[in-house]
Amino acid sequence: MKEFSYSKVFLLGFGFFGISVLWPLYNAYVPIFLKDFALSSFLIGIVMTIDNIFAIVMLPYIGTLSDQTRTRFGRRKPYILVGAPLGALFFLLIPLMRSAKSLFMMMVVIIVMNFSMALFRSPVIALMPDITPSKYRSQANGIINFMGGFGALLAYFAGKPLYDANNAYPFFIGAALMLFANLLVCLFIKEPEEYTQPQDSSKVIETVKKGNKELMSNLRDVLFSKEKSLLFMLLSILLWFIGFNALETFFTSYAKFHLSISESTGALVLGVFSLTFMLFSIPAGIIGSKIGRKKTISIGLLVLVLCLFLVVIVSIFLDGKSILLPMFFLLFAISGTGWALVNVNSLPMVVDMTKSEKVGGYTGLYYFFSMAANIFAPPLAGIFIDTLGYSSLMVFSIIFVILSFVTMRFVRRGEATQS
């Protein structure tokens, strides 16, 4: 019987903390570095989707492969022990390749870094359900999201002074933090004994074959199972992430070109959203465990729809008038709490639709659908904006959040059990 330990989950949260430190720095500064090579914005955009491409291709497979892995370190840690050091190394090489003025080497470093990060994301997140009883997984995921949010905020606030001092410093410090955080996970998180078994190197091919077989089994679970809860849950995740990612991508432009306020003010509004999401992550997990995950997610989606609808109303009267800006900040602060109710409880629902032997694969499915949204959302929202103007951005997000609310009505499984 697994025992729930807040201290153990906080330690595990350092894995997500480390990952969350790197990506804001990568997304903020790598496009600027690529401009040095006279690349068009279109080509830079393609480069910046490499992480999402690796994610949707690798995360379901690596998660499933880790389910079948047995070593003296466990089934998840080998991927962390390989992926985290490689990811850190190639992340800190990025500014050095800029200084070397080699586009070829810059691309090699970016590709290997993204590949390395994809190697261990599913396994490190799958450790949460591995060591946490079902009825506590919402609380545990709340803690992990809190740690991830803290890592992202640290990157945003500490990244600027570090970058101003030397453009390589954020990469050096970020790599060191990520490596240290995942070292803590590997040292202090003990995997269940049934998965810590020495494996003969000759059985590696057999493990890969089992992983391939299980991946196909997981896909059959999604597409061909008579009971469609998993399919509708994953569709819901895709839909609400499309709505969220469109907002995240275009909000600063919406602020500048539609609301007539500065893009920095728009970024601050998103910062308030991220802050309340982080602060409400742990309460969101507790709420999910008390009233049920599906009900909690549904409430969160309704909060998002209501707040975004009010944003549309307020924006009609804003037109550059700073007097209404506090209302904007308040609405996005409340939206952050709604997003926490949704985001914190969704992964536990997915992994509780399967048995412990397949948790890694189902974690990979969760990330496949959430990351796929990052590829679909910007061009889809861009078409809306090009056709109807920036005022359509909020409407676009509202539509997809409402669609996710509808698909959630068909989810019948995924609540906590007593195991």
Image (cartoon, helix red, strand yellow):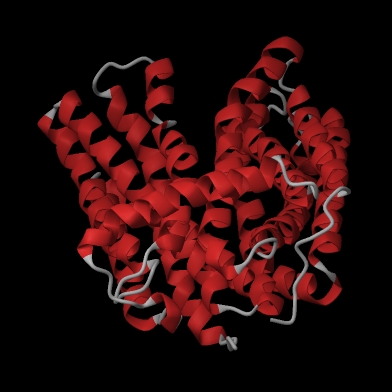
Work out which quarter of the rendered image holds the N terminus and state it. Answer: bottom right
Q: Is residue 275 found left or right of 204 in the rendered image?
A: right
Report which quarter residue 322 is drawn in. Answer: top right
Q: Is residue 155 visible?
A: no
Q: Is residue 239 above or below residue 127?
A: above
Q: Residue at x 74, y 56 (%)?
A: 342
Q: Is residue 417 above or below residue 110?
A: below
Q: Residue at x 39, y 66 (%)?
A: 76
Q: Is residue 44 visible?
A: yes
Q: Residue at x 33, y 36 (%)?
A: 30
Judging depth in this view, the residue of 375 and 271 nearest the camera is 375
Q: Position of residue 154 (x, y in %)?
A: 44, 61
Report which quarter residue 37 is drawn in. Answer: top left
Q: Position of residue 418 (x, y in %)?
A: 74, 82
Q: Is residue 403 above or below residue 297?
A: above
Judging depth in this view, the residue of 71 and 368 nearest the camera is 71
Q: Is residue 33 found left or right of 324 in the rendered image?
A: left
Q: Residue furthest left?
A: 100
Q: Residue at x 69, y 81 (%)?
A: 419
Q: Position of residue 257 (x, y in %)?
A: 66, 22
Q: Position of residue 391 (x, y in %)?
A: 77, 23
Q: Is residue 33 above or below residue 208?
A: above
